[in-house]
Amino acid sequence: MESPSVQDILGENAWLYIGATVVVLWFIVWLYRDSLEIEELTDKYVFVTGCDSGFGNLLCKKLDRKGFRVLAGCLTEKGADDLKRSAGPYLKTVLLNVTNQDSVQKAMEFTKNEVGEKGLWGIVNNAGCSLPMGPSEWMRVEDFQNTLKVNLNGMISMTMTFLPLIKKARGRIVNVASVLGRVAANGGGYCISKFAVEAFSDCLRRDINYFGVKVCIIEPGFFRTAVTSLDPLERELHRLWNQLSPDVQASYGDKYLDKYIKVQRLIMNAVCDSDLTKVTSCMEHALTAVHPRSRYSAGWDAKLLWIPLSYMPSCVVDIGLKLVLPRPSKSV
Ligand SMILES: *[C@@H]1O[C@H](CO)[C@@H](O)[C@H](O)[C@H]1NC(C)=O
């Protein structure tokens, strides 16, 4: 007697049912695995860079409330004082300029002293700057380099200097990239630096996982922080425009700058989210989950627009930007 086949029992769509069941089960297992949290936060130290404002500032306060021992790197005296005043007694601040190797080294020595034999559980490389941004042709070489110094060289020197402390604790490295590290939509050093942050973090994750160290990338969409603040963005665009030769200015036309600024304002006001907790929740997950994710995209614009765009052919973004941005007057 023949035994009944899968089709006999489940009918014609057997493989469809089996496939759907596997997908649902896989998702449930993933959700469960994703929700597991580590224990004993209160003896764990986390170092965060760029804590004067924005994501870094908010993250420090949230980690402090959770019970972590927070070490907050601030660029300015005022940033450090303000943060200290709004946090509990365990949070400590340290002045840090990530572009200065002496300053990074000093912060590491301070941290080494604080954490002792346990090592450092987490480092959140959050410090970043966006300016100047604008049409590529308007940039001088120094304009690219100033952004790269902070966002890329700063992150590399922080990570490499603190790595021995992290390795000791089998800890976490959390690097803040951007959706602009997935889609290059704006000229200047910012997109370049964030693409580089993605590459640096991927390589590091693949090389260092043997030692129990996990590397996570945070990809925020557009949020209301110093990085997207319109006044400095526009001030920089004016500066770039003023440093152009009359020839180049003429090829764009004298209305171009105003139109460009108007479009930028419209877009920023439409897409910038003021709920920074969407980003800090991802950072918290990276630091507290048993199995942190390799990538976190934060914000609806990231999930629904930028990340899908990053998988599409280049011409989709080319055409999209052409439709949105003004046209130089002497374009051919
Ligand atoms: C940070 O350090 C660099 C390199 O030493 C220096 O050029 C820059 O002015 C410093 N920035 C601040 C805000 O202190």
Image (spheres, helix red, strand yellow):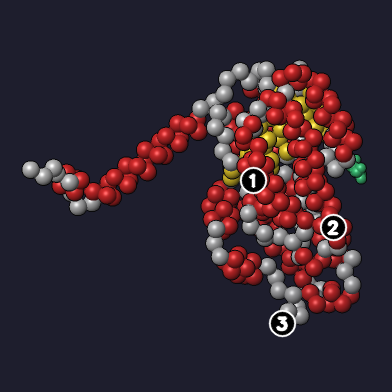
Report which quarter residue 306 is drawn in: bottom right
Please state which of the two labelled residues, at mark 1 or mark 3, is closer to the viewer: 1
Tell which quarter ligand 1 is in. top right
Let me know if residue 166 appears in the view: yes
Residue farthest toward the bottom in the current orientation of the protein: 332
Q: Can you identify the residue that label 1 sits on? A: 202
Q: Which mark is residue 284?
A: none
Q: Where in the figure is residue 108, as x and y percent of width and height?
A: 82, 29
Compare residues 318 and 47 and report the one nearer the observer. Answer: 47
Q: Amino acid at mark 3?
A: Val
Q: Where in the figure is residue 171, as x and y percent of width and height?
A: 66, 29
Compare residues 164 and 80 and report the one nearer the observer. Answer: 164
Tag 1's secondary structure?
Answer: helix
Compare residues 37 and 101 and report the one nearer the observer. Answer: 101
Compare residues 2 and 303 and report the one nearer the observer. Answer: 2
Q: Where in the figure is residue 206, as x and y percent of width and height?
A: 62, 42
Q: Amino acid at mark 1?
A: Asp
Question: Left or right: 207 with respect to 189?
Answer: left
Question: Left or right: 78 with respect to 326?
Answer: right
